[in-house]
Image: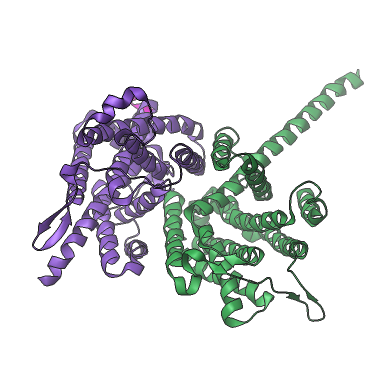
Amino acid sequence: MDLMVTLGPHLLNGLALGLLFALVALGFMLIIGVMEVINLAHGSLFALGAYVAVALVTPEGGLRLAALGPYFATPIPMRFVVALLVAPIVVAGVGMGLEVCLRRTYGRDPLYGLLLTFGAALVIEELIRLVWGPTERFLPVPPSISGGISLGGLIYSVYRFFASAFAVGMIVLLWLFLQRTRYGALIKAGAHDSEMVRALGINLKRLRLLVFAFGTALAAVAGIVMAPIWGVRPHVGVDAVVPAFVVIVLGGVGSFWGAVIAGLLVGMVVGLTGAFATAWSLVSMYILLIVVVTVRGRGLLGKKSVLEK
Amino acid sequence: MKPMLVTFALFGTMPLWIEPVGLYRYLGVEIMIWCLFALGFNLLLGYTGLPSFGHGAYFGVGAYAMGLTQFKLVANLWLGLLAATLAAAIVGGLVALFISHRRGIYFALMTIAFGQMFFFIASKWTSVTGGEDGLLNIQRLPADFGVVRVSLVSNLAMSYFTFVTFVVVTALLWRLVHSPFGKVLRAIKQNETRMAYLGYRVFVYKWASFTLSCAVAGLAGGLFAMAQGGAYVQVMSLQWSGVVVLMTLIGGGLVSFWGPVVGTIVYFLARDLLGAYTESWLLWFGLMFMLVVMFKPEGVAGAWQEIIARVGARRRARAGALQPAAGE
């Protein structure tokens, strides 16, 4: 019982981390599914989302327009909500631009798509450095969800509760979207067989654009929610996107719940090793991955997919 | 054969002209080492068709092995280089056991995961690797040929030594890709399933290709540690692993053996020339790279081959047009 009590805060950390990893991974997986492209720029877009949020929440965040004076006079919670709504749209716009560039690589070796997004990652990261500088920024949190609460003698961070709840909400919404709407059905069909989708008279071009916008917007949302926990640095994206890769392979490419379960597993493993065996905290998820993949070649819930060709 | 002679002539005479043209000798050493790395990497990417995004790790393993041999075992250049090559080959060979049955995107994701794992191990295992500070004060040991000992402390001597290593390894790689083994690798790139049905043990070939390219990466890493006098963890990061892919592709590694050499030269010249004007040279380089992938995905070598083919076709067309005229 004593152990369980001391574990509490670390489990909460792991939970928040894992759910956010799952969110990044799901956006990334939508793109892999429909486009068959590994979007290496996903991490940079995650970081971009956080930076745009910083610009929208703090006056010294880059938007130095006099006309915005009254806007920055509004209370922080208001600006935080605006950031959560506007920043993903901005990032989705960048993502759509990237998809337009990617069009030239369709039908060629998938390697080229991967390389194009690697180039885009370099460009976005350098642009961030150019606009916001290389120093670390902080995203202020509304007072109502900051600070800590005491439960059973231990202090839990309120923000991590918020982050976990928010991520759960997003994951459920995403699942409902994929399960219950026409576009969701199209995205799933596109991941299964995009040629057939086109043959049935669906505008595949528009679908791909939409999926890319949607996937990158999810990265941005995760970036914003993660920002108060991790801080905002130009290369923060790598720290998020590499666990997302791990989550996808671990959960099985193409499996929604596989990614969620794997995200939770990775988050818990990172959170717990971070608390009890710090030296192992950065390596533990890879060991988990290697062990699982050695036993189950396609990950936890993976099925045979077109991507194995 | 012609590109080989051009490359060797260019690199062999480099110490003579690199200072008069306004560059510096150490740049030449750097270029040759990274060419070596990229050529070895292209055995995997260009010939076997396996995209690895974690190859910086093996370069780093080589660099650390070089330093550790010198500090902990024996200060001998040959043993250091041998240790660098073997260490990277062993680590790479073990990793290859886990990933050689995979293809495409799965393969790429697994190489990223392994690469990151080694990166974090190297950055945290301070007692062995020096952690974030790196292994400092790696000496350029003299090359001992029994009768003579040649000091490599000057960049001039280092240039020639790197050049000789480059020639030897490149010749071996060239021989390898033109051997039956190389043909099998290329066939695997085209259609792995068919090769398996034909009775080739695809796993073994992929494993060998990965391990060999790791060995070359380790040798290059060992040379690099020696050249810059230290081994640092940064080269093992995801970004540096990506840079090697970028060098290989921008030059045209998918269509030419020499593509990686061109790409490496382009990268370092861009770094020094663009870098002289702007801090954010990677921004411009990244944009250039995106344009290359979009419009000339076969890279510099691809564009060159296209020009040659077009000129040849025009010459033939002209010769064809003249023929009937002469007949009349």
Image coordinates of residue A15 in percent, x first then y, are 21, 55
Q: Which residues are magenta?
A: A200-204
Image coordinates of residue B20 in percent, x first then y, are 81, 48
Image coordinates of residue B327 in percent, x first then y, are 90, 21
Quadrant in the picture for the N terminus of chain A: bottom left
Which chain is painted in green? B
Q: How is the image coloured?
A: by chain
Q: Looking at this view, is B54 or A92 the one in front?
A: A92
Where B198 falls versus B190 (above or below)? below
Where B305 falls versus A200 (above or below)? below
Residue at horizontal 70%, vertical 59%? B170
Residue lying at the far top of the rendered structure? B328
Q: Is residue A171 left or right of residue A50?
A: left
Q: Is residue B204 left or right of residue B14?
A: left
Q: Looking at this view, is A303 or A149 the one in front?
A: A149
Quadrant of the rendered structure where residue B289 is? top right
Q: Is residue B86 visible?
A: no
Residue at horizontal 68%, vertical 70%? B140
Q: Looking at this view, is B217 or A223 the one in front?
A: A223
Give the total of numbered labels: 0
Residue B45: within the magenta? no
Q: Looking at this view, is B144 or A259 the one in front?
A: B144
Q: Is residue A91 left or right of residue B173?
A: left
Image coordinates of residue B52 in percent, x first then y, are 50, 54
Where B178 falls versus B85 (above or below)? above
Where B320 falls versus A243 (above or below)? above
Residue at horizontal 34%, vertical 44%? A29
Q: Magenta-highlighted stretch: main secondary structure?
A: loop
Give the color of chain A as drawn.
Answer: purple
Quadrant of the rendered structure where residue A62 is? top left
Q: Is residue A6 visible?
A: yes
Residue at horizontal 13%, vertical 62%? A154
